[in-house]
Amino acid sequence: MTPETTTSLTRPLPSGLATVEQDIARACKEARRDRTTVQLIAVSKTFDGSAISPIIDAGQRVFGENRVQEAKAKWPALIAACPGIALHLIGPLQSNKAKEAVALFDAIHSVDRPSICEALAKEIRSQNKTPELFVQLNTGEEPQKAGVAPGEADAFIASCRDKYGLVISGLMCIPPVDEAPAPHFALTAKIAARNGLTKLSMGMSADFAIAIQFGATHIRVGSAIFGHR
């Protein structure tokens, strides 16, 4: 289970988080969407507990990390101090880290190849734990970037379900940095719709307002909240 998408505020918001919340509210209003349909993932990669704790204290409960080992080193203590936090793995996953990933994360946004499907299926059965799974698309078909090519997405999603028995909740994409993001968000939404997927992980600090216009349900925001790394 993941926490509610609204932020339960317990202390005044740090300035970065406050600005992001205002921008999300504005984008949702312009898109005629309810704010509760967009979940903010605060991307805390490379930041330590001293930087993360004020964001937790302000009521944010959903966080994103890129690396299993980094998350494993810092999050158990933070979660012990504040139960109810949900962790999302938004970076690439290696098959040999699947066991730790399933144990630690509530959602995995980087399902993108058969070896990962097989490893996740094994650990989900073994641990009796079902993290939310997103298939990562490589909408720009960039050779240096992970993800499934759009033309292969339908077959891959079907394989996840039929061959490996995985429950896929949605799609994730990261548009090329030198291209307008809107066509990539639109393509991701189109592929999700024809595969019966309702969740879209798309949009980061620079473009989450655009992603919300195209139906993003999860936005991954780091520097706008924590500052530059």
Image: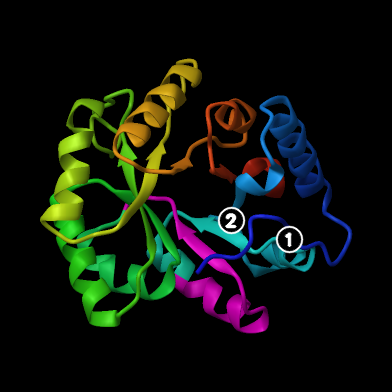
The residue located at (77%, 32%) in the rendering is 26
Q: Please tell me whether mark 1 sits on a helix, a strand or a loop.
A: helix
Image x and y of residue 109, in percent: 39, 51
Image x and y of residue 40, in percent: 62, 49
* Residue interval drawn in magenta: 72-92
Question: Residues at badges 1 and 2 in contact (C-beta under 8 Å)?
Answer: yes
Give the answer, above or below, for where 182 lies relative to 81: above
Q: Which residue is mark 1?
A: 55
Left or right relative to 34: residue 212: left
Image x and y of residue 61, in percent: 65, 64
Which mark is on residue 44?
2
The residue located at (19%, 52%) in the rendering is 160
Give the answer, above or below, for where 116 lies relative to 224: below
Image x and y of residue 33, in percent: 66, 35
**Residue pushed farthest right?**
12
Q: Please tell me whether mark 2 sits on a helix, a strand or a loop.
A: loop
Whether residue 229 is visible: no
Whether residue 73 is visible: yes
The image quarter in which residue 203 lies? top right
Question: Relative to the observer, which residue lies in front, 195 or 73?
Answer: 195
Mark nearer the N terminus (1 vs 2): 2
